[in-house]
Amino acid sequence: MFTNFIQFFYPDIKQEEIKKFSLLALAFLFTIGTYWLMRLLKDLVLYKLAFPCCLGWAEDTGRLWIPYVKTLSPLFVFFIVLLYGRLVDIFKKHVLMYVVATFYIIVFSYMTIILFLKHTYGDIFIGKTLLAASGIVGYLFTESFGSLMVALFWSFTISSSTTDQAKRAFPFIVAAGQFGAIGGSSLMLIKTAVIWPFYATVVLCLIFFITTIQHLIKIIPNDELQSDIVHEHKKEHHAWSGFTLLFSQPYLIGVLIVSTFYEITGTILEYQMNSQASFIFDHIQFKWFKGLYGVSINTLAFMIALLGTSYIIKKLGTQICLLIYPILFALLLFSLYSFYYLSEHNPFYILWALFLVMLIIKAVSYAVNSPVKEMMYIPTSKDAKFKTKSIIDMFGSRFAKMSGARIGGTFNIEGNPTLSIHNLITYGTLISLGVIGIWIMAAIYVGKTNSKLLKDKKIIE
């Protein structure tokens, strides 16, 4: 019955491949479900819980810290990238996932304990410095998880799939991930001020992730977990090899732009939305709003991934699909800009307009852009798939988000939220459109080069 269900929506997946890709999809479900729950929690903790007024913080301290924390994020991730690059050389690809997942289990067990103590004994028991530091540390590790674990999963999946399998099965994996994201996000809709059980759920999901990969390795033969792109030349490995490869290959620089520039514009928009929400809502309402945000995005992305992604990729091809997202992004930004200047500047109207734009942008990103940009790594070596990809997805993504946050922070006027939002929408939109122009040119180059590499059966190494 389960096999029939999958083949009804994804008829191109062969029956003998269903077990393998079902387990990969389940692992991705736990990965994305965990990430979305953490992603929403990190904003709640930093905006509303880490800097309580009862410990002497100003009411808006958490929101104003966002640009600074995102500035720290690339530096923080930089050291993780170097360590990860070394681990790639030491461990087998599935063992590497166990190691990294276990590390995050330890980190978020700590967050569970801190928030349990806060709930049980109060803010004063934790102390001003430790509570603020825990909020910042939780934010940074969540950001690194979103880059590291997702990148690691896709590196493993890409290296375990043929080119043909990727085109047929990756949309199914993405759809499963969106289903997990809906589940993770929906937990935030629970009306409670108690936060620590949510972090305990994160830890539990990571344990399930490890168990799923272990089962995959146990029941799927090793020869079915191989790519059809073989890396024949053995190169000397060192901590900087991923960076060296990235900056020596124009194709990979193009992939860097395609994979990260949307984060600049997306971060500017999301900061506008979160800022507006933090002015309007208390911490319980803010938690509900973030939950609604996550559920809405991932429900739409799930529907697109289930019904449209495979058809779009097959019908239009990867070259066109790479361009769909930036063009749509530009149109939505222009529409938001027009709405802001043609309507009354009602805070609720602006908030829900931002919500709608972010809903479409994020959903299309996860359902269409994400699987397509992952396919760009198929004609690349192991170093490119694991080391360079990790740099792009972790350091590159964090740097892009930092840039977006710093742009957003520049337009902040302390004590004047209305003017802050005005500046963010006016100037942030114009900067974002310029960024999208560069992104579109890179997408054209990457799409053409990828097609030629696949046609000639060559790889980037």
Image (cartoon, grey):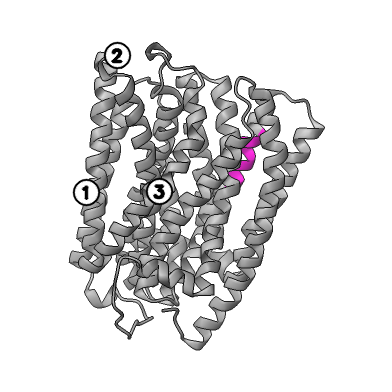
Res 36 quadrant in image: top left
Real-space Cα separation, disc 2 to disc 1, in angstroms: 31 Å
- Amino acid type assigned to the residue bearing label 2 in the image: Ile
Identified by mark 1, the residue type is Thr
Please say whether residue 63 is visible from this viewpoint.
Answer: yes
Residue 357 lies within the magenta run: yes
Q: Mark 2 sits on what residue?
A: 124
Q: Is residue 35 above or below residue 56?
A: below
Residue corresponding to mark 3? 75
**Which residue lies most toward the right here?**
342
Most distant residue in the bottom direction: 456
Name the residue tied to disc 1: 102
N-terminal of the two: label 3 or label 2? 3
* Above or below: residue 80 compared with residue 374: above
Task: Specify whether 262 is left or right of 165.
Answer: right
315 falls in the magenta region? no
* Marking on residue 89: none
Residue density around tag 1, few if under 14, some if 14–19, many if 20 or more, within 10 Å: some
Q: Which residues are magenta?
A: 353-361
Upstream in the sequence, badge 2 or badge 1? Answer: 1
Front position in the image: 115 or 128:
128
Reading the chain from its start, which is encountered first: label 1 or label 3?
A: 3
Determine whether the residue tagged by mark 3 lies in a helix, strand or loop.
helix
For image coordinates 40% across by 34% down, the residue present is: 42
Looking at numbered disc 3 in the image, what kind of residue is underneath it? Leu
Between marks 3 and 2 in the image, the one whose residue lies nearer the viewer:
3
Between residues 181 and 459, which one lies in front from this camera angle? 459
